[in-house]
Amino acid sequence: MTDYRNVPLDFPRGFLIGSATASYQVEGAAHEDGRTPSIWDTFSHTPGRIWNNDTGDVACDHYHRLEEDLDLMARLGLEAYRFSISWSRVLPGAGGVVNPAGIDFYSRLVDGLRARGIRPIATLYHWDLPQELEDAGGWPNRDTAYRFAEYAARTVEHLGDRVDTWSTLNEPWCAAYLGYGSGAHAPGRTNGADALAAVHHLNLAHGLAVPEIRREATNDPEVSVTLNFHVPRGEKEAGVLVDALANRAFTGPMLRGRYDDDLQEATRSVTDWSFVKDGDLEQTKQDIDVLGVNYYSTVTVRTWDGTSEKVMNDGHKNVGGS
């Protein structure tokens, strides 16, 4: 047996070793310095939604331990750090006025990373929609995409001279299907038509935000989006459908300016896709510099026979059924 501990690592030129976090998962300080609730605050405080009733109120306390955490990153030898920005911390109440305390936190984070030789990679949206926008309809509501573009512009206006890479969205598959289809993630809604409308409006949000990032940034950053790709195995027909719903529902409009026919045909019983307006697909297709790929495992799929109990890929029963 080969002892791989002694095999030299040969990474390609330009390869960066880094780590990534999400704002609600690490920051804490959920009710401090002007931050208002996101859908994950509401969801995690709803009894029965989260294992052990845990919340992100404190989390890793990153908000208060910023310098200590930056030193840990340097000791780990990180060359890049991908963090996400809390929309509710930067624009409390989903308003249009930037919160000085909120943007100052991210400014100190970026400056601290650069001072330690760590490349800042910022994600604008990692699932934590301001609760006010959810109350107005959430991602199934078209207006949310335009509000996201405004948030992107205001954030990049303040940080766009120092961030090397901007990612518009992290895993919109989760935000749309788990948030509005199965109900497993915030906001916990269970409606298939809403989930597909959310898919489109997240794609539109990306398309609207990319030009705003390039307009406001002054350091010519890379622009990206981060998708979690599904690699299905098992029945071929089911695999093609999973690929359409999970992968091509995002890469199609973002990279090619289209939704594939098989995706629309397979979902006709759920929605008529009337939420796609003239000009949307030209807007969703934006030139990007980097495609973020989050990959976890393959998925084994089969066609549902119409009678057996549906099960989510984490083993839990799908109570919402999309």
Image (spheres, rainbow, N blue to C red):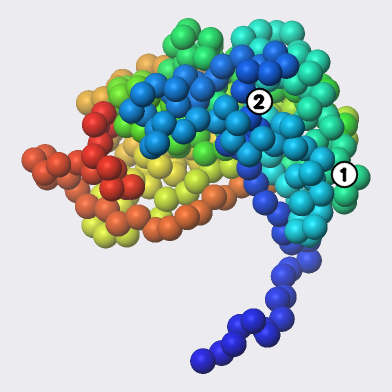
Tell me where residue 247 appears, x and y as whole percent. 44, 44
Query: What residue does disc 2 label?
Result: 29
Point out the image quarter for the C terminus.
Answer: top left
Instruction: Confirm whether residue 76 shows in the render.
Output: yes
Q: Amino acid at mark 2?
A: Ala
Q: Secondary structure at mark 1?
A: helix
Q: Is residue 226 left or right of residue 13?
A: left
Toward the viewer: 198 or 18? 18
Q: Is residue 230 left or right of residue 122?
A: left
Tell me where residue 25 appears, x and y as whole percent. 58, 36
Query: What residue does disc 1 label?
Result: 114
The residue carrying pointer 1 sits among few (fewer than 14), some (14 to 19) or many (20 or more) residues within 10 Å by Cα, namely some
Cα separation, mark 2 vs mark 1, equals 24 Å
Dot 2 or dot 1, earlier in sequence: 2
Tell me where residue 278 appears, x and y as whole percent. 50, 17
Q: Secondary structure at mark 2?
A: loop
What residue appears at the point 33 percent right and 28 percent down from the top-left corner?
A: 48
Would you identify the image quadrant in which residue 304 lies?
Answer: top left
What residue appears at the point 79 percent right and 44 percent down from the top-left corner?
A: 68
Toward the viewer: 308 or 1? 1
Toward the viewer: 127 or 206? 127
* In front: label 2 or label 1: 2
Would you identify the image quadrant in which residue 164 lies?
Answer: top right
Q: Amino acid at mark 1?
A: Arg
- The extreme bottom residue here reads 1
